[in-house]
Every structure is written in C-alpha cells, then in structure tokens.
Amino acid sequence: MDAPFPFGFPTATAFYLTLYVLTLVVHVVFMNYVVAGTAYLAWRSWRGPVAAGGAGDPIAEVLRDWMPFALSAAITAGVAPLLFVQILYQRPFYTANQLLFHRWMAILPVLIVGFYLLYLLKSGYARRCGPLPRGLIALGAAACFLFTGWSWTENHLLSLRESSWPRFYESGRMMHYEAALLPRLGVWMIGSLPTMAMLVGWQLHGLRRRGAAIESPALRRLAWLALVGIAGSATMCVTHDTISEGGLKDALLGPMGRPWAVLLAAGVAMQIVAWAALLRRPESCTVPLSLAAAGVLLSILGMSIAREILRIRALSVDRLFQQHEIAMGVGGWWLFVLLAIVNIGVIAWAMTLVRRGLRTAGDRTPQEFTW
Ligand code: HEM
C-alpha cells in the first residue's frame, strides 16, 4: 500500500479506520490523565505530612478532585473505539478476548475497585488519615489502572499472534507474555506523563486566573514530569522497536506512515520547546501550554496511527474489506447523527452548569476547591 494511512484502503475500511483512530486518541487523552495522575498521587502521598494530603501541592489537590471524573471519561471514551475495533478486526479481536477468558473480564471488577478507591482518596477520611493508609489507597488505585492497561496490551498482542492461538488454547493458559509486552506497556504508561502534565497545567492556569495562589514550583514540576515522560517513552519505543526488529521504524518510515511520522516528530519537538519555555518562565504559561496541548495531540495521533499500521501489516486485512463494506451498508446513520447531536447538547449543557458554578465559587485557594 503506497498511499498515506488511511487513503489507500477501500472507502468503508478507511472510514472505520479514521473513526477508530480519532476516538482512540480521545480515550488515550483521558486514560493518560488517570494513569499518570494516580501514579503521581501515590508518589506524593509518601512525601511528608503536608504534601501527603495534597495540601500544599496544588497538583495533587487538583488531581484528587478530578480523578473520579477523569476515570469515567476514560471509560466512556473507550466505548467508541471498542465498537470500531470490533468492526475492523472482528476475528482476531474476539479470539484474543475469548482465549484470555476470565483474565480478560477481570478488568471490570478491577476498574470498579479502582473507581471506589478514587472516591475514598477524595473523602474526608483519607484527608484525616496518615500518609501510609493514604499512600496505600492511591497505590491501590494506580495498580488497578496499571493492570487494566496491561490487559489491553496483552489482548492486543495476543490478537496479532494467530499462529500461537491453538497452543495457547490447548495449554489452558489465561495469560499471554512476549518480550514486546513490557516496553509496549511502558510506552503507554510512561508516555501518559506529558498529557497529564499539560492538562493539570491548564487546570492550575485556570485556578490562577480565578485568583488562587499557584506558585511557580508546581508548574516547574509539571514541566519536569512531562520531559521525563517524553524521554522515558522514547526509550521504551526504541526498546520495543529493537525487540520487534524494526517494525515500528518501518511502520513510521514506510509510505503509509511517513506524513504521520513528520507530525509525530513535530508534536514531540513542540512539547519539548513548550516545557523548556515553561521551566524558564513559569509565570507566563498560556502560550507554552497551548503549544504543549497541540504537541500532545499530534504525538498521540502519530503513535496511534503507527500502532495501527503495525497491526495492518501483522494481519491480513484484505479479507476483511468486504465485511467493512457490509457493516457500512447497515442502516441507522441518521439515528446515530440524531443521538450524537442530543448527546453533544447534553454535554454542553452540563459544562455550562459547571462553569456557572465555578464562576460563583469566587477566588478560593486550590485547597478549597473541592467540587
Ligand atoms: C483506566 C482504565 C484504562 C486504561 C489504563 C486503559 C489503557 C489502555 C491502553 C494502554 C491501551 C493500548 C494497548 C496497546 O496498544 O498496547 C488501550 C487500548 C484500548 N482501550 Fe483502554 N484502558 C482503560 C479502560 C478502557 C475501557 C473501560 C475501555 C472500553 C470501554 C477501553 C477501550 C480501549 C480500546 C477499544 C482500545 C484499543 C484496543 C485495540 O485496538 O486493540 N479502555 N487502553
């Protein structure tokens, strides 16, 4: 295929690939906030009595307040790509789900536990108790989300290994391991830091504009976290590529991936420039944060497309083209549009209500912002 992704594919396939990748990007943005945010909360909980509660650390305070919302957003945003991935890769996707069996379904109870731990972390009880129990709650939540991320990676890798399915089934195993698993998971988990830093950066910026005292060290810390995340996920990418014998490099530098590789590189460069600028002058952050936001979106888009090219090369998608055509011929388009409009309207209304509530909240300090 010589055209850039997704143009070389039949219309139906290109349509579903585009929707899949775009909706996956939204899922990844929220998922990154949750993964990096809970890891940050776990880390900060152990650091002294003041920082432990998040009091004195506006980053921890904001994260703790918003985390249950962010988790529900990550889960809800996962539904759309879940629908599209099933249309796109039917057999491999379902087979991996079924082979992993209870192990795969375990993400549901684990996510429920994670949800409740986040509410517990936000409660007055957690504020009052010492760093050890508070740290354990945050660590428990972080472990739940790490487990969920690992499960998605494991499922994805198993879905690509068709030749190993019969042996896997015969052995009755419910876990799939291969050398690429850890670096691949590392790309996602460590790569979640820059997105979280950018989103929390905007949240702190908003609080500062409403009069809260946000000191420069908090913004500098975010910049350092983002830079560590970029360096760490780049290292994981190189490790993954070495293990997969240049697969990622080929996917990005081949005709399908080249334009997206340029955007990915631009996204990473924009982020580095933005965070370096913020480190130098944390008091003026609108421009650096805008640049970081654009960079984060380009980077996630580029990585998601590279990931898809790798999968397309590993599976023979040609045999699925006809099924994509059939799926596209099924009715319901106008019902979908109607429901999309209704839902966007409801979300916009909910956001207006929240904004109105925040406006009347006045200029409280971040510690008082417990929505
Ligand atoms: C906090 C909870 C979650 C975390 C940490 C998480 C993490 C991840 C990660 C790391 C991947 C990429 C896997 C890879 O390419 O190696 C992924 C993919 C995906 N996630 Fe999530 N996820 C979460 C919850 C969910 C939920 C609840 C849904 C569904 C409602 C979902 C839907 C998806 C889909 C559809 C994909 C793409 C799968 C594929 O293309 O094979 N995720 N997730």
Image (cartoon, rainbow, N blue to C red):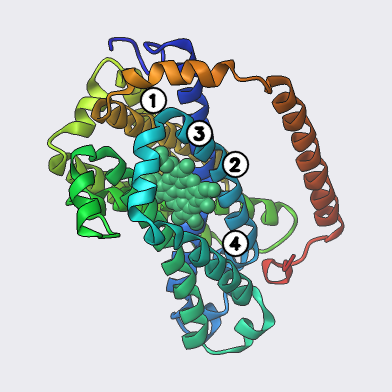
Alpha-carbon neighbours of circle 4 within 10 Å: few (<14), some, or many (≥20)?
A: many
What is the secondary structure assignment of the residue under circle 1?
helix
CB atoms of marks 1 and 2 within 8 Å: no
* Residue extending furthest toward the front: 170
The answer to which of marks 3 and 1 sits earlier in the sequence is 1
Where does the image place residue 89, in percent across and percent down from the top left?
A: 39, 31
The front one of 213 and 95 is 95
Tell me how far mark 3 sits from mark 4, CA to CA.
23 Å
Question: Which residue is under mark 3?
Answer: 294
**Residue at (23%, 38%) from the top-left corner?**
162
Separation of disc 4 and disc 1 at Cα? 30 Å
Quickly name the residue at label 2: 286
Mark 4 or mark 1, whichever is nearer to me:
4
Residue 241 figure quarter: top left
Q: Is residue 195 above or below residue 321?
A: below
* Of the image marks 3 and 4, the number of the one nearer the N terminus: 4
> Whole-percent x and y of residue 127?
62, 82
Q: Secondary structure at mark 3?
A: helix
Dot 2: element: helix
The type of residue carrying mark 4 is: Met
Q: Residues within 10 Å of mark 2 (few under 14, many from 20)?
A: some
Looking at the rendered structure, the kind of residue marked 2 is Thr
Q: Is residue 15 above or below residue 69?
A: above
Which disc number belongs to residue 263? 1
**Distance from label 1 to label 2 (Cα)?**
22 Å
Residue bearing the label numbered 4: 67
